[in-house]
Amino acid sequence: MTEPTDFISEIVRADNEAGTFDARVQTRFPPEPNGYLHIGHAKSIVVNFSTAQRFGGICNLRMDDTNPETEEAEYVEGILEDLRWLGYEPSKVVFASDYFEQLYAWAEYLVEQGKAYVDDQDGDTISEQRGGYGKPGIESPYRSRPAAESLDLLRRMRAGEFEDGARCLRAKIDMQSENMWLRDPVLYRIRRASHHRTADTWSIYPTYDWAHGQSDAIEGVTHSLCTMEFESHRPLYDWLLEQLPLPGDKPQQTEFARMEVTHTITSKRRLRNLVEDGVVEGWSDPRMPTLRGLRRRGYPAGAIRAFCVETGTTRTNSRQAIELLESFVRRDLNLTAQRRMVVLRPLRLVLDNWPTDADGNPEVEYFEVANNPENPDDGTRRVAFTGTLVIERDDFAEVPPPKFFRLSPGKEVRLRGAYLITATSVVKDSDGEVVEVRATYDPLSKGGSAPDGRKVKSTMHWVSVPQSVPVQAALYDRLFTAAVPGEASGEPLDDLNPASRELLTDALAEAAVAEASPGQVLQFERLGYFAADTDQPGLFHRTVGLRDEWAAIQKRAAKQ
């Protein structure tokens, strides 16, 4: 097996060969528990966990719980559940809040060393004084405050003596630095908010930049793998660690490209808007790019992992085609999903010459059908066939258009695995709509082949009505019409697709469909892959269709 050659693997391999960190490898995945994980997080999960696994190391799950107003225990449990579903078990589950005492002690240390000070200015003033690119920063009038005074104020901040926003703790670095993150960043802010783990113990909370690197150091992280938006933070990450009496080696931050997917968004704020505004039916709505939404829709965890690996680990942000992701899903399900016959938009089909028993009741015949041609170990099932069936409404045309090879008056077609039939007449309702097709079957064509060798051009699926079970099917289109939501208007939600979901309530399925377990994915023959809902029996979500759109895209690209 060829060793991976992505740049992160090369860095870690070089560190191991040089004896850096004593050839030890430890990574971490640090989500904030203010929402559920999405497809973008999957990339980071795969990079962090696979890097540790590849080099015999460990990877922790660390909740970055430093913003109590937006974080909830519900999200903590959801993140852990989604991570394990994706196929990863963290070495430890830890929290930034586990280190609040140590982080505070180090904050006092920085103040004592003259590397941090308490600023009495409000947030807007501090932001304005930071300046901008090409615009010099302005030093706070409190920057030269004596260390003893800042230390006293910091302790009183912790004790809860001041109102929210009245003061903050800032690192004393360089207000003229070209890197904006080095212009005396805020380390602590006053927030009277109850924390999901520490309750009301703290009145001050660390910022991400103060908690991030120091938490890495406390845990013993060697390679802190972040997405590219944190590249500009790295000088601050290094500066803070260099000022402190660390318990071990200084971690090394390396950035890699985040991943976006076309026709989706991964902003937690906007995803929350979709939920709160009722655009979708919660975080697990099958249209959502959250891992729990993809799981409910029937995406296999292995397909998501393979997609993340295939798209590579680089330093250039990219937007991957959703058709590529669907191709991985389809490839996985083709091998694992059992086949079933379901008619989504039923049209009644009656075989006039179907035999009856002595009492005049239609006979029932059973066909032995493979559960999955791709996997003989899945065995076979018995499917009932009678003279009263349903077919897809689109499979019949009273006046067929050119090159229409499915059923029409006088035309012969094959019913999948059963018989050849020929339509003879139709029954219409008062509005002139066809509600029933009358036909005859060829008794000598059992199994779908005629003894005289005549050919038919169409094979259609069907369901026997007396043995059928009713099901509902939810069909999904892209949640966003634009490949890059918001590219034209600047607001992604402007590109929402109002027709992203269609619920079919009159579908009929062969009896075996009723045996599907919650979450199981079946291939509805000729229609696509469908996942049984985890909560509502009889509801199936279309995972993907059968047509490989990615292959078609590649063929078109090759011709250009």
Image (spheres, rainbow, N blue to C red):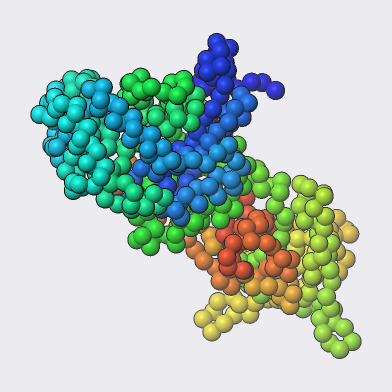
Q: Position of residue 77 (x, y in %)?
A: 50, 52
Q: Nearer the viewer, residue 439 or 390?
A: 390
Looking at the picture, tell me which residue is in the foreground, 36 or 90.
90
Q: Quadrant of the N terminus?
A: top right
Residue drawn at 26 percent across, 50 percent down: 192
Q: Going 44% across and 62% down the picture, which residue do you hit?
A: 281
Judge left or right: residue 472 versus residue 186: right
323 up-or-down from 501: above or below: above
Does residue 483 appear anywhere in the picture?
Answer: no
Residue 165: x %, y % from top left: 19, 44
| Direction bottom: furthest residue | 359
**Is 502 or 302 nearer to us in this picture?**
302
- Residue 247, by quadrant, is top left
Q: Is residue 459 visible?
A: yes
Q: Is residue 295 above or below residue 205?
A: below
**Residue 390 location (% of width, % of height):** 68, 71
| Residue 421, position as x, y percentages in the image | 76, 67
When the figure is inspected, residue 95 is found, relative to residue 443, above or below; the finding is above
At x 38%, y 62%, the residue is: 278
Q: Nearer the viewer, residue 396 or 240?
A: 240
Give the side of residue 155 with respect to residue 557, left or right: left
Residue furthest top as drawn:
18
547 vs 162, left or right, is right
Q: Residue at x 45, y 30 (%)?
A: 218
Q: How many marks?
A: 0
